[in-house]
Image (cartoon, rainbow, N blue to C red):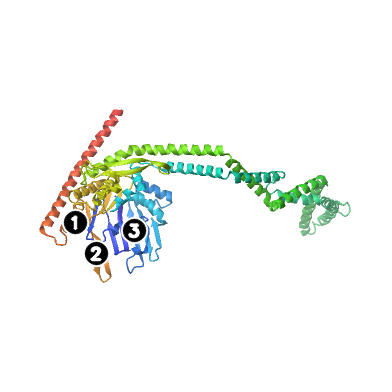
Amino acid sequence: MSLRHIVLRDFVIVRAFDLDLSTGFTALTGETGAGKSILIDAVQLVLGSRAESGVIREGANRTEISAEFDVTPDVLSWLQEEGFDDIAAQDGVLLKRTIDLQGKSRAWINGSPATAAQLRALGDLLLDIHGQHAWQSLTRPDAVRGLLDAYASIDLKNLHSAWTSWRLATQTLHDAQHDQASLQDERERLMWQVGEVDKLSPAADEWDELNNQHTRLSHAQALMDAAQSAIQALEDDDNGALTLLAKAQTALQEQAHVEAEFANWVDVLASSVAQASDVAHSLQAYLSHTELDPDGLQALDERMGLWMSLARRFKRTPQELPAVYAEWKQRLLQLEASSDLEALERAQAQAFTHYTTEAQKVSKARAKAAPQLATSITQAMQGLGMQGGRFEVALETNDQPSASGLESVVFLVAGHAGSTPRPVGKVASGGELSRIALAIAVTTSQLGSAQTLIFDEVDSGVGGAVAETVGRLMQQLGIDRQVLAVTHLPQVAACADHHGVVSKHSDAQGVASSVTLVEGEERVSEIARMLGGEKISDTTRAHAREMLHLHNKNLSANANTNENTVAISNAKVTAKVKAKA
């Protein structure tokens, strides 16, 4: 199963509602206006549909919806990719959503804040809903194509990527062709600007270094004089600092045996002598490789002058010139590439070839799947009161390629034997449209990974033996998946494994709706009400019991059939293994 539990608080006409759900097929019934579809609306909201304050029960401040689902491998992988708590998800995934009177919505997945888009993405993995107006989507080309692609397990990701690349290459070529004159003018202007600055080829951070070098060279004589004066002050034979420090050190050292504190001062003076000696040595080395360089200073003056001249000409600061120069060269490369129309044409042709290759793969997969889907839906139609009817899936080549491929998909239907298949949208009978939509829903319900299927009054417009067929179809679907169906047909409800009755009542706090799971005589009474209206006779009760009795017999028959099917499948697998061996 998938949907375990759902909780509603102050939703539409529901004050407080808690419902545990089971595996198999669950039918939801009730009188008109009781709120049978409220549960479906709540599930859609908690799975990310548009939130509005109108869903809040009158007199309440906000509505709250929670739904707990089982976890499949696909769901667990999605939770991990999106960064939700996948450890807690080992036991289930809890979705929660609140909506206040201002229409503000908040959502959580396993207690962590989530967006409505994330709810929708997760909802696609958890649950499929087939609405009572599902036939309307059969007139929309994108929905029709989506059904066939889903049936054929076609992934359009590569096709969309190829389409985007082709369109971009086409637009780039078009722009280049259209703008050749203006681009050539810009290219010539940039070539002149880059050529002028090429004379300098300014490097990043070079301007600051030039200024530092210029300052040193222009003050070279003063620096040398200062170094020479410092050396003389340190090393003069009679009055130099080193000589005087040495004398002070010797005087104190001779009396250190008398005054112990002198020893500390001797050490300080010794350190001072060493440091002063190092300075003198460094100054000698500085003078040995420092000299006046008028030629170097002149070269710096010339380079800095050119730098300043170019900066003024192009209205930039000297510090900005290297970055502007790099920007111009990059733009020039782009313009040269844009002016190479032959290269752009080759790129556009290659992109189109890639798109065509991907589109032909999709076309081939659609052509293979179309008759298979048509056959499956045709078979489903026979059991829905459309004996002799035929369903076709036509592929029509588009005038122009599109992001979805080279063809459009059209559903054609013939309602009875001998009639010519026509587009579904032109079928006049609303009952036929509903049954066709139901046939498609049943045929495609096994697609995807969602373990819960919800049918919201998709049996509208059918009755009698067809209604029994609908009930059995949903019962069969419930063997492998969890099925919930809102229905007004007793034949469908009688086939359910579980039966919930939606009722509306009034009290001092207003009108409220609730759901009660019924069994035994309570279920008999509900089926009888659906058969005969408000006045339930012994005859309708007997009829209801008979319908439920037949359902139980069908369950036993289905169980035996499933066991036989498993045995046959195992035998086929064994035979294949032996054949390979």
**Image coords of residue 336 (percent x, y):** 60, 41
Residue at 31% from the left image edge and 51% from the top image edge = 136
In the image: residue 424, left or right of residue 77: left
Query: Which mark sits nearer the N-terminus, 3 or 2?
Result: 3
In the image: residue 537, left or right of residue 334: left
Query: Which residue matches tag 2?
Result: 504
Query: Which residue matches tag 3?
Result: 66
Task: State if disc 2 and disc 1 touch (CB < 8 Å).
Answer: no
Query: Which mark sits nearer the N-terminus, 3 or 1?
Result: 3
Asked if residue 434 can be seen in this view, the reply is yes
Q: Residues within 10 Å of mark 3 (few under 14, many from 20)?
A: many
Residue at 41% from the left image edge and 39% from the top image edge = 359
Element carrying mark 3: strand
**C-alpha distance separating marks 1 and 2:** 19 Å
Instruction: Report the front residue among 77 and 529.
Output: 529
Asked if residue 293 can be seen in this view, the reply is no
- Which residue is outermost to the bottom? 508
Q: Quadrant of the C terminus?
A: top left
Element carrying mark 2: strand
**Image coords of residue 347 (percent x, y):** 52, 38
Task: State if disc 1 and disc 3 touch (CB < 8 Å).
Answer: no
Which numbered disc covers residue 519? Answer: 1
